[in-house]
Image: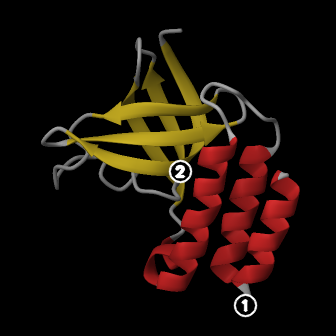
């Protein structure tokens, strides 16, 4: 596949090696995929902010055998309120975990990115996050 672009939501991250980070992202075109962001844990890296969980990002990726490699990343929406409130963070992490467990790798589901994105937007501004959670679960099923 070579070099490709993806508008995606970061649904999971984990540390890899001394300075790298592996992100699991989801988008409607490619489904759930994993990519390594080289040097993303270094304080001066340009990928530090873009590889955080819940981010809606534009990625430039290079396809590899097992993992993609993040070449560039641009944040569209960072969902900062979700990281500042522990309750909202728990709800957002739950939604991302549902997507991660419900979708197989490289299995695209049209509309799921929009559902997750709109749910995260509503979660950041909602008075009752439980309603957003129930609506998301119903639509995901």
Task: Give the side of residue 39 with respect to residue 65, left or right.
Answer: left
Above or below, 102 against 115 in this view is above
> Of the numbered discs in the image, which one, if any, rests on residue 29?
none
Residue at 59 percent across and 68 percent down: it is 92
Q: Residues within 10 Å of mark 2 (few under 14, many from 20)?
A: many
The residue positioned farthest toward the left in the image shown: 18
Residue 7: percent from left, percent from top: 61, 39
Instruction: State which tag comes first along the sequence, 2 or 1.
Output: 2
Which residue is rendered at x = 78% and y = 35% of the image?
109
The residue carrying mark 2 is 11
Along the horizontal axis of the image, is 81 left or right of 50? right
Q: Residue at x 47, y 83 (%)?
A: 86
Question: How far separated are the C-alphas under marks 2 and 1?
Answer: 23 Å
Q: Position of residue 50 (x, y in %)?
A: 40, 51
On the image, the x and y values in percent for residue 31 come to 66, 31
Circle 1 Cα neighbour tier, 10 Å, few/some/many (<14 / 14–19 / ≥20): few
**Which mark, residue 127?**
1
The foreground one among 94 and 4 is: 94
In the rendered image, which quarter is residue 91 located in?
A: bottom right
Front one among 102 and 41: 102
* Residue appearing at x 51%, y 49% in the figure: 10
Residue found farthest to the bottom: 127
State the SS at label 2.
Answer: strand
Residue 49 lies left or right of residue 38; in this view the side is: right
Q: Is residue 76 above or below residue 137?
A: above
């Amino acid at each position: 596949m070579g070099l490709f672009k993806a508008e995606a939501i970061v649904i999971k991250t984990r540390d890899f090696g001394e300075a790298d980070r592996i992100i699991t992202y989801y988008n409607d075109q490619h489904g759930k995929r994993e990519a390594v962001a080289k040097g993303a844990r270094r304080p001066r890296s340009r990928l530090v902010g873009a590889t955080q969980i819940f981010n809606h990002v534009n990625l430039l990726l290079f396809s590899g055998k097992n993992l993609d490699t993040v070449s560039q990343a641009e944040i569209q929406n960072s969902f900062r309120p979700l990281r500042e409130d522990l309750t909202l963070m728990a709800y957002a992490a739950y939604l991302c975990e549902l997507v991660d467990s419900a979708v197989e790798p490289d299995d695209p589901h049209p509309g799921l990115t929009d559902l997750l994105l709109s749910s995260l937007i509503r979660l950041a501004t909602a008075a009752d996050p439980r309603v957003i959670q129930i609506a998301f679960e119903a639509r995901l099923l």
